[in-house]
Image: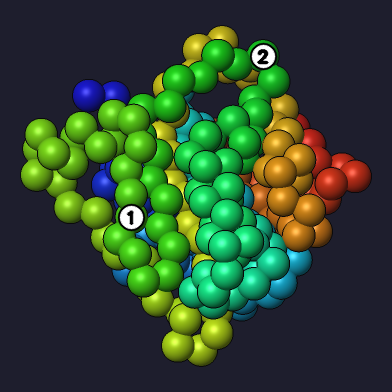
Amino acid sequence: MSRFSSYRAARRALAFLACGFVSTTGLAQSDEAGFLDIAAHSHGTATLTVIISGEQVVLGFESPAFNLLGFESAPATPEQEAALAHAEAVLASAENLVSISGARCEVRDLQISRPGHGAHAHGEAEHDAHDHGDTVHESHDHAANGHWEFQVNAALHCLDLPARPALTATVFEHFSGIETLELLWATDTQQGAATLTAATPSATLN
C-alpha cells in the first residue's frame, strides 16, 4: 500500500498539514475528523488543500453547500434533489476539483461527506472499507445552525510530477457559486498558500 493510499492516511496527512499552518500562519485548523477548516463558513468561498510527497498526492476540499447547490437545507423539490445528485456526481471525480499540469494521476481513494450522512467511498476506498474493516467518519452536521458543507478527501498516485507543479482549480468550471478558493499546499520541501478565482484559477507551487 502506498503512503497515502488509504482514506484514513489521507485524513491524517491533511490534519498534519492543517496543524502546521496553525503554528506558522494561524490560517487553518482541523476538526477531529481530519478535515481542513481554514475560516468560518462563508458563502462564495471554498478551500482546497494539496499535499505532494514523491508520487503521492492528497487532496482536501471543503465548501458550503450553498456554493454548490444554491441552498443549504434538505432538498425539498425535485429540482433540489437533482442539484444535489449533480453536485455529488461532480465531486466524485478528483479531476473536477484540480488538475496538475504534466502529471498522470490515478485516484486511489476518494471520500465525499455532507451533513447528516456518513462519508461515502469511491473507487479503491470502497473496497478497502469492506475488505479491511476501515470505518469512515461521519461529517459534522451543521444543519442545526443552517450551515451545510460538503467535504471531499482524495488520495492519488501521480507519475511525471514536475519539480514545480502547476495546479489549476477545475472546480470553478462546475460550480459558479464558488467565487474564491483558498489554497493551502505542501511538498516534501516547502509549503504555501494562495487565493484562486475563476479568472485566476492556477498557481505554481514554488
Report if residue 25 is visible in the image. no
Secondary structure under the numbered disc 2 in the rendered image: loop
In percent of the image, x 61 and y 40: which residue is there? 97
Q: Which residue is mark 2?
A: 102
The quarter in which the C terminus is drawn is top right
Callout 2 amino acid: Gly
Viewer-proximal residue among 74 and 49:
74
Task: Identify the disc placed on residue 146.
Answer: none
Q: Position of residue 189 (x, y in %)?
A: 54, 34
In the displayed structure, 121 sits above or below 161; it is: below
**x and y percentages locating residue 131 in the rendered image:** 10, 34
Instruction: Give the left or right position of residue 187, taking residue 153 as reference.
Output: right
Say which of 124 and 24 sits in front.
124
* Left or right, 173 with reference to 59: right
Q: Residues within 10 Å of mark 2 (few under 14, many from 20)?
A: some
Question: Mark 1 packing: few (<14 Cα in 10 Å), some, or many (20+)?
Answer: many
**Quadrant, the N terminus:** top left
Please tell me the numbered disc located at residue 119: 1
Residue 41 image point, x, y percent:
61, 76
Q: Residue at x 40, y 76 (%)?
A: 141
User: Mark 2 vs mark 1: which is more N-terminal?
Assistant: 2
Question: For residue 56, which quarter of the picture?
Answer: top left
The residue nearer to you, when weighing 122 against 50, is 122
Residue 104, quarter of picture? top right
Work out whether 72 lies above or below 166: below
Res 200 visible:
yes
Can you tell which of label 2 and label 1 is closer to the viewer? 1
